[in-house]
């Protein structure tokens, strides 16, 4: 494997770690506070996640991570809406 390939894999793994750290932190905060996060709160959780993952933020990685977080949140909302229907049947 080339050094560039290994570096790309390491970056993807580090970004995944940041995403997982951030989702975990935001979920705990939302459950404790019962409030949707503000943009400031989201950025706070992002900084914490970078620190915990030991990953140095770049503009490009931040954009990729925030897009991934957005997709994960959209997916979770869709799942929750489906579950809240009760009978599991589409309406």
Image (cartoon, rainbow, N blue to C red):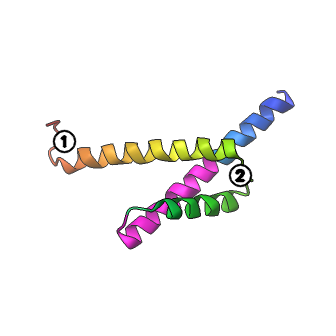
* 68 on left or right of 13: left
Q: Earlier in the sequence, mark 2 or mark 1?
A: 2
Callout 2 touching callout 1 (CB < 8 Å): no
Q: Residue at x 74, y 41 (%)?
A: 10
According to the picture, the residue beneath numbered tag 1 turns out to be 88
Identify the residue at the far right of this view.
3
Q: Residue at x 68, y 57 (%)?
A: 53
Residue 2 locus on image (x, y percent): 85, 27
Q: Is residue 45 above or below residue 20?
A: below
Residue 5 locus on image (x, y percent): 78, 30
Residue 63 falls in which quadrant of the image? Answer: top right
Q: Nearer the viewer, mark 2 or mark 1?
A: 2
Q: Residue at x 69, y 62 (%)?
A: 51
Residue 12 falls in which quadrant of the image? Answer: top right
Q: Quadrant of the N terminus?
A: top right
Q: Residue at x 59, y 58 (%)?
A: 46
Residue 21 among magenta residues: yes
Residue neighbourhood size for the residue with mark 2, other residues' Cα within 10 Å, grouped as few (<14), some (14–19), many (≥20): some
Residue nearest the viewer, comparing 86 with 49 = 49
Residue 61 locus on image (x, y percent): 66, 44
According to the picture, the residue beneath numbered tag 2 turns out to be 57
User: What secondary structure is marked by label 2?
Assistant: loop
Query: Which residues are drawn in magenta?
Result: 16-35
């Amino acid at each position: 494997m080339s050094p560039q390939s290994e570096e790309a894999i390491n970056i993807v793994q580090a970004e995944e770690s940041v995403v997982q750290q951030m989702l975990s932190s935001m979920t705990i905060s939302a459950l404790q506070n019962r409030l949707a996060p503000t943009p400031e709160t989201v950025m706070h959780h992002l900084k914490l996640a970078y620190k915990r993952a030991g990953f140095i933020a770049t503009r490009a990685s931040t954009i990729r991570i925030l897009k991934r977080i957005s997709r994960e949140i959209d997916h979770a909302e869709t799942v929750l809406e489906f579950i809240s229907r009760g009978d599991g049947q589409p309406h």
